[in-house]
Image (spheres, rainbow, N blue to C red):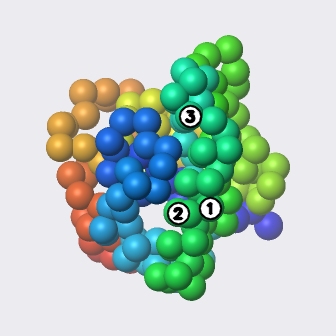
Amino acid sequence: MKRKAVFFDRDGVINIDKGYVYSKNEFEFNPAIFDLLSFYKSQGYLLLVVTNQSGIARGYYSIEDFLDLTEYMQTQIKSKLGFGFDKVYFCPHLDGCNCRKPKTGMFEEADMDFGIDFTNSIMIGDKQSDMQAAQNAGIGKKFYLSIKKPDFSEIQGLQWVIALQQIQTFEEKEK
């Protein structure tokens, strides 16, 4: 049986995007992420991270730095909620790969790991490449988190939000 999932971009969604965040000193959770994770967990969704981390290819930080910060992020979430993300997928490249969003490699890997029902899954991101990757993967619902209205009309199932808190409100209204 295929499983529904919520795919979260990291920088700008899970945490405040301060540009190439790689240490816990710079890592600041978006305060609304905890309620949103709890909501989706209670609805039976897998919670997955798909994040481009070109800072690794640029030499700003190492894979080990990224993995250490991911462990810190997971530990903080687990201590607060009792659970964490089911898996974190990341692309360490700048180009020449199949994993960097808007390509679908991370989504394909998640499908191999969990058997994803993409039509009934959700992407939450703050960049056009997040939305395009979700579209390319066949994800049914996409939440674009930005203070700027999206200017890309080719994305189907797109919902523009300016705050994470709006997502749960939209989801509850649909029930």
Give the Cα separation between the discs numbered 3 and 2: 17 Å
Residue designated by label 3:
61
Residue drawn at the location 67% of the way across and 59% of the way down: 87
Q: Is residue 96 left or right of residue 25?
A: right
Residue drawn at the location 38% of the way across and 67% of the way down: 33
Q: Nearer the viewer, mark 3 or mark 2?
A: 3
Could you tell me which secondary element the residue under label 3 belongs to? loop
Q: Is residue 113 above or below residue 103?
A: below
Residue 86: x percent and y percent? 66, 66
Q: Amino acid at mark 1?
A: Glu
Give the Cα separation between the discs numbered 3 and 1: 16 Å
Q: Residues within 10 Å of mark 1 (few under 14, many from 20)?
A: few
Using the image as rendered, state which of residue 81 and residue 24 is in the foreground.
Answer: 24
Residue 129: x percent and y percent? 45, 30
Residue drawn at the location 40% of the way across and 73% of the way down: 34
Q: Is residue 13 left or right of residue 64?
A: left
Q: Which quadrant of the figure has residue 20?
A: top left
Q: Nearer the viewer, mark 3 or mark 1?
A: 3
Q: Which quadrant of the figure has residue 133?
A: top right
Could you tell me which secondary element the residue under label 1 belongs to? helix
Q: Earlier in the sequence, mark 3 or mark 1?
A: 3
Q: Residues within 10 Å of mark 3 (few under 14, many from 20)?
A: some
Residue designated by label 2:
73
Q: Amino acid at mark 3?
A: Tyr
From the image, which quarter does the N terminus lie in? bottom right
Q: Earlier in the sequence, mark 3 or mark 2?
A: 3
Q: Amino acid at mark 2?
A: Met
Residue designated by label 1:
71
From the image, which quarter does the C terminus lie in? bottom left
